[in-house]
Amino acid sequence: MLITQIKSIKEIIKFGIKKIFVIKCIGCKEVYFPEKDVDNLINELTNSNIEIIQTISTEYLCNADFSKIISEKYKSQIEYVDSILIFSCGVGVQVVSSILEDKLVLPGCDTLNIPGYQGLTSQNFNCDLCGECYLNYTAGICPITSCSKSLLNGPCGGAKNGKCEVNKEMDCGWEKIYKRLSKFNLAKKQIDVVKIRNFLKLQEGVIGEKNETV
Ligand code: SF4
Ligand code: SF4
């Protein structure tokens, strides 16, 4: 059983969203989904002048085939909005984010760490139930599961040719995050919010050290 907990409206609106498409994953039976709280939050968003183009409920958003069907079905509405707000576990958000590459996909929930069966999860994405979902800061790519070291504030600096220094079969999660944030012009903003490390500073430090010893 896993439990999702609704994020605060403050956390959701800080990305400057104006027109949104809302997806509620009423989920597999293994997920506790607080639907009443979600509806209250949706009302709050409307009262805060966020235009909600459409709200839909679905099941198994974590299944990429289902999510692709939904994306096709609501294509015209999705094209019209600036962001997609998703109430689901972390896997559902990541799956939709990977399908709607040109849309900012934001989580409306935190997924809590409750031991036990997690329901249907896709093979390509994972959620470690960290309890404080970061996907709104990382453009829908989970830093906990896509980075070998689960770093929250940027890369370790060891990636080579886009591959992780721990596992060379795997793309560096933080390189993917940075590229996707850049696509939405959010990289600079997130450098301040998440304090993404600037490895140029490290290089400058090395150069400075070399200069001292020369
Ligand atoms: S940040 Fe990752 S591990 Fe944490 S809730 Fe979100 S998807 Fe799950
Ligand atoms: S190379 Fe990238 S994915 Fe690997 S540990 Fe470092 S930051 Fe994480």
Image: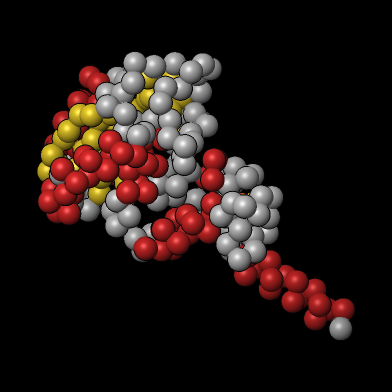
At 40% across and 46% down in the image, what residue appears? 140
Q: With respect to residue 67, does 181 lie above or below?
A: below
Where is 61 relative to 212, above or below? above
- Quarter residue 89 falls in: top left
Quadrant containing the C terminus is: bottom right
Left/right placement of residue 178 relative to residue 33 reads right
Q: Position of residue 30 (x, y in %)?
A: 39, 16
> In the rendered image of this protein, does residue 125 appear above or below residue 178?
above
Farthest-out residue, bottom: 214
The answer to whether 42 is drawn above or below residue 18 in the figure is above
Residue in the picture at 13% in, 39% down: 54
Residue 39 image offset from top left, x and y in percent: 20, 26
How many numbered marks does the figure carry?
0
Percent position of residue 8, x then y: 33, 33
- Whether residue 148 sits left or right of residue 58 in the image: it is right
Instruction: Give residue 121's position: percent from left, percent from top.
Output: 43, 30
Location of residue 163 by image quarter: bottom right
Q: Is residue 154 visible?
A: no
Q: Residue at x 37, y 19 (%)?
A: 31
Residue at 58 percent of width and 62 percent of height = 162
Q: Nearer the viewer, residue 57 or 43?
A: 57
